[in-house]
Image (cartoon, rainbow, N blue to C red):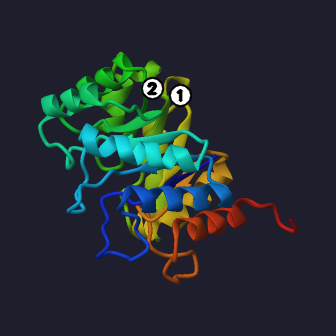
Amino acid sequence: MIQVCLNGPRGAGDSAAVPMSPAAMAESAAAAVAAGAAEVHVHPKTPCGHDTLSARVLAPVLTAIRDAVDVPVGVTTGAWAEPDPECRAQRVRSWTVLPDHASVNWHERGAEEVAAALLERGVGVEAGIWSGTDAARRLLASPLAPRVTRVLAEVTDPDPATASATARALLDELGSAHGVPVLLHGEDGGAWPVARLAIRLGLDTRIGLEDTLFLPDGRPARSNAELVEALRRLRLPEGA
């Protein structure tokens, strides 16, 4: 399964291809799904371009994307969008339009409270397990672990020479992860090496302008769809 991550915390200053408005996110999602993405992950943005968990912003983003595609759509609950963990959980409880799932970074303070709020509302939880943190240990000890939709094994090592080794170490930390599906991905210089590893291991993965602004050959990506197409080509068997 390929998930497209449309924008992340990036903004227009990072690349003109990064979708910022609900309409742009919907258009980008539609093209990425047509290129082969089976799910969408998006960071709703304020008019100033900041990530937010506000119900007033989330609702039009989700509505626009769902009008454009018929696949699961997930959002972030990252602490940078709402630093106070109690407020993050309150934001989740205030949502008027619900995503199919939401990522929760398990190393962040209040992760379990945010995950519990999502589960109370019937929203799937993607447990974000970042390399270089104690998130794997925390998740494996959590009573919520068996209830998460999937584990996002997130390799934060941007070095293409070492990212694959970092990814393998993270997967070793997770072990069986209570039998929960794992989606493995990297970022920046590590995005493509980790994507190739995920393919070799038969794991779900993701790609998009959140994770990298560049194609495997180093050219700037013109769209999320172009990144998905590039990943799909990596997944195709030789001669296909």
Of all residues, the one furthest to the right in this rendering is 239
Q: Is residue 159 left or right of residue 40?
A: left
131 in relation to 149, above or below: below
Which residue does the image show at 48% across and 33% down from the upper left?
100
The circle drawn on residue 180 is 1
The location of residue 57, given as percent across then percent down, is 28, 46
Which of disc 1 and disc 2 is earlier in sequence? Answer: 2
The location of residue 216, given as percent across then percent down, is 57, 75
Q: Amino acid at mark 2?
A: Val
Of all residues, the one furthest to the bottom in this rendering is 219
- The reply to whether dot 2 and dot 1 touch (C-beta < 8 Å) is yes
199 in relation to 216, above or below: above
Disc 2 marks which residue?
148
Q: Amino acid at mark 1?
A: Val
Neighbour tally class for label 1: few under 14, some 14-19, many 20 plus, Cα within 10 Å: some
For residue 7, what is the image quadrant?
A: bottom left
For the residue labelled by badge 2, is the local secondary structure a helix, a strand or a loop?
loop
Circle nearer the viewer, 2 or 1: 2
Q: Is residue 215 left or right of residue 157?
A: right
Q: Is residue 30 left or right of residue 94?
A: right
Whether residue 22 appears in this view of the structure is yes
4 in relation to 11, above or below: above
Which residue does the image show at 32% across and 26% down from the upper left?
115
For the residue labelled by badge 1, is the local secondary structure a helix, a strand or a loop?
loop
* In the foreground, 226 or 107: 226
* In the foreground, 223 or 159: 223
